[in-house]
Image: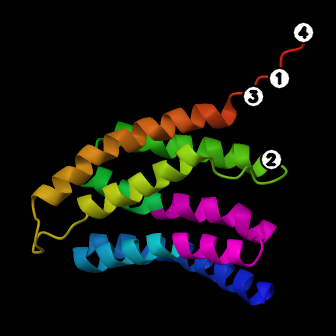
């Protein structure tokens, strides 16, 4: 039973990575509703693949290494579009993407893929929520205040991203010897 669940989890991870391109295309074409749904489904697939992997007794090492990278692709696509549309400042998006590349490189060097910390997981959830709100289509109920709320939530997600990066790369102190 664990092999099919792991395969499904890995398939969801790959599908999430592939979703970045149609997401950017939908945004470029002004299809914000489609882009919003793609981002929502991709975010839900992130939760689903983790749940399936745990249910299978643990994910594959391939999936454990690919999952955080697909999160980065999926987050980068709308962030770059929001920066190009002047919704977010380019420096903030650059800082966040530089953090993501740094941590991805660091995690790739770790023998166990360096599982995400609690603050890293919270950061990812906050980023997805922030992006979903900023991409909220203008014709939907809740416009224009929901995109503004997303903009305000972006800043704590950036602060959490930077602080969690420090937690990843700062060497843990060894136990004191008396």
Look at mark 2 in the image and give the residue it sits on. Answer: 110
Q: Residues within 10 Å of mark 4 (few under 14, many from 20)?
A: few
On screen, residue 122 above or below 164: below
Q: Residues within 10 Å of mark 3 (few under 14, many from 20)?
A: few
**Pointers 1 and 4 in contact (C-beta within 8 Å):** no
* Whole-percent x, y for residue 124 in the image: 48, 54
Q: Label 1 vs label 4: CA separation?
A: 12 Å
Q: Label 2 vs label 3: CA separation?
A: 14 Å
* Whole-percent x, y for residue 11 in the image: 64, 82
Residue 86 seen anywhere in this rendered image of the structure: no
Residue in the picture at 75% in, 71% down: 59
Q: Label 2 vs label 1: CA separation?
A: 18 Å
**Pointers 1 and 3 in contact (C-beta within 8 Å):** yes
2 or 65: nearer the viewer: 2
Residue 98 disc label: none
Secondary structure predominantly adopted by residues drawn in magenta: helix
Look at mark 4 in the image and give the residue it sits on. Answer: 178
In this rendering, the count of numbered labels is 4
Tell which residue pokes out farthest to the front in this image: 178
Q: Which residues are magenta?
A: 46-74
Look at mark 3 in the image and give the residue it sits on. Answer: 172
Residue in the picture at 71% in, 43% down: 106
On screen, residue 22 above or below 173: below
* Whole-percent x, y for residue 137 in the image: 18, 71
Instruction: Determine the image quadrant of residue 52.
Output: bottom right
Residue in the picture at 53% in, 41% down: 98
Look at mark 1 in the image and give the residue it sits on. Answer: 174
Dot placed on the residue nearer the N-terminal end, 4 or 2: 2
Q: Please name which of the two marks, 2 or 3, marks the residue nearer to the observer.
A: 3
Instruction: Determine the image quadrant of residue 145.
Output: bottom left
Q: Please indicate whether residue 54 sits to the left or right of residue 129 in the image.
A: right
């Amino acid at each position: 039973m664990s092999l099919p669940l792991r395969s499904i989890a890995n398939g969801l991870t790959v599908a999430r990575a592939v979703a970045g391109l149609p997401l950017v295309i939908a945004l470029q074409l002004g299809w914000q509703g489609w882009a919003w749904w793609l981002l929502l489904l991709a975010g839900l697939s992130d939760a689903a693949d983790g749940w399936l992997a745990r249910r299978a007794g643990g994910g594959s090492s391939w999936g454990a290494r690919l999952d955080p990278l697909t999160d980065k692709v999926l987050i980068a696509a709308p962030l770059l579009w929001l920066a190009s549309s002047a919704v977010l400042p380019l420096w903030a998006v650059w800082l966040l993407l530089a953090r993501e590349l740094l941590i991805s490189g660091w995690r790739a060097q770790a023998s166990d893929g360096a599982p995400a910390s609690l603050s890293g997981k919270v950061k990812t959830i906050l980023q997805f929520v922030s992006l979903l709100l900023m991409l909220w289509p203008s014709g939907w109920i809740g416009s224009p205040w929901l995109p503004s709320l997303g903009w305000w939530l972006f800043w704590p997600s950036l602060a959490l991203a930077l602080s969690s990066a420090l937690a990843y790369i700062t060497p843990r102190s060894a136990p004191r010897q008396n």
